[in-house]
Image: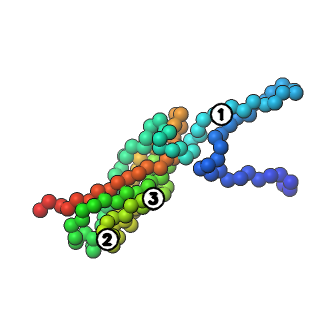
Amino acid sequence: PLGLPTAAPASATAAPATRTTAAPMGQAPSTTGIGVLEGDLVDLAEVDVTPQTLVETKVTLPRVAARTPLSGYVILRVLVNEKGGVDDVAVLRGFSPPTSGVDEACVRAVKQRRYKPAMKGGQRVKTWLTVKLIFTPAAR
């Protein structure tokens, strides 16, 4: 219908959800916070229960990298959704010295992980985690 405003898409910086209750004639309605809703993005420091790894996946290195003993780590930023899946992964610190395909292999492996989702106010919520994958040379 023409003339009706459309809802703006929600974003991570949106104001907290509120509920407006009806008021008697001549009084302003009251607005109260209702907390978080399932699927809201909540900072890790503010969740009641942090995500727990249920299925950890192995990093499968490309042949070039697998031939060389690796020692080091990769740090990833991982968005765990309210269902325990991984929605997004970003490399915060790549493998050093840069080795062909290591960072990409880490991202692929972490995208396959499954988590028990974070909880806030009894609701399953999305949150960002920092994951550090450590590589040590295999003992011979």
For the point 68% across and 31% down, the residue is: 32
Question: In the visual, does 66 lie left or right of 24?
Answer: left
Residue 23 image point, x, y percent: 80, 27
Label 1 packing within 10 angstroms: few (<14), some (14-19), many (20+): few
Q: Quadrant of residue 63?
A: bottom left
Q: Quadrant of the N terminus?
A: bottom right
Label 3 packing within 10 angstroms: few (<14), some (14-19), many (20+): many
Residue 111 image point, x, y percent: 42, 58
Q: Which amino acid, mark 2?
A: Thr
Residue 33 image point, x, y percent: 65, 33
Q: Quadrant of residue 52?
A: top left
| Along the line of sight, the residue nearer the viewer: 115 or 8 | 8
Question: In the visual, does 11 lie left or right of 7?
Answer: left
Residue under numbered circle 1: 33
Label 2 packing within 10 angstroms: few (<14), some (14-19), many (20+): some
For the point 51% across and 44% down, the residue is: 43
For the point 32% across and 56% down, the residue is: 133
Residue under numbered circle 3: 89
Query: Disc 2 on helix, strand or loop?
Result: loop
In the drawing, what numbered circle is on residue 111? none
* First in sequence: mark 2 vs mark 1: 1
Name, please, the residue furthest toward the bottom.
64
Residue 16, compared with residue 137, is above or below; it is above
Residue under numbered circle 2: 99
Q: Which amino acid, mark 3?
A: Val
From where the camera sits, is residue 119 visible? no
Query: Disc 3 on helix, strand or loop?
Result: strand
